[in-house]
Image (tube, rainbow, N blue to C red):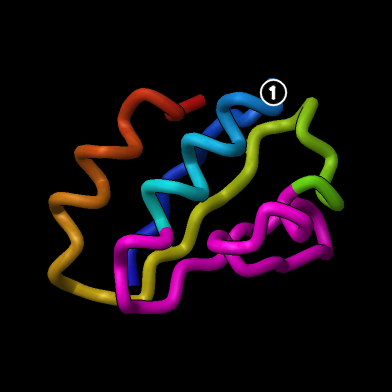
Amino acid sequence: MKSVKISLEMAQRVKEFVNITQSYAYEILLKSGKYVVDAKSILGIFSLDLSQPIMVEIYSDNCDDLLESLKKFEA
């Protein structure tokens, strides 16, 4: 498992983030406080407090390409 902290403050960034994560077969979760949602669920993401940084947990050891794609969202 690998983790990275991101920021998704605008709706357009959420849409772009979901489009990226949906192309990966492995499990990707977002954690904000006590809440955990699927990173591929746009409705789940909008249920989080997007004014705060969010932790992305990637359940794959071979995810360097995804980490590279997520650099633009890093908090």
Q: Judging from the image, what secondary structure is the residue with disc 1 in? A: loop
Coordinates of residue 5 in the picture (x, y in percent): 50, 40
Q: Nearer the viewer, residue 40 or 70?
A: 40
Structural crowding at the residue carrying mark 1, measured as other residues with C-alpha within 10 Å and reported as few (<14), some (14–19) or many (≥20): some
Instruction: Tell me: residue 45, above or below residue 13.
Output: below
- Report if residue 12 lies within the magenta region: no
Q: Is residue 2 above or below residue 72?
A: below
Residue span colored magenta: 22-45
Say which amino acid is labelled 1. Answer: Glu
Percent position of residue 42, x then y: 68, 53
Q: Is residue 61 above or below residue 68?
A: below
Q: Which residue is mark 1?
A: 9
Q: Nearer the viewer, residue 10 or 74?
A: 10
Where does the image place residue 1, in percent across and percent down from the top left?
Answer: 34, 73
Instruction: Name which residue lies at 81% across and 64% down.
Output: 35
Q: Is residue 32 magenta?
A: yes
Residue visible at 61% across and 58% down? 30
Residue drawn at point x = 37 percent, y = 48 percent:
20
Q: Is residue 65 left or right of residue 35?
A: left
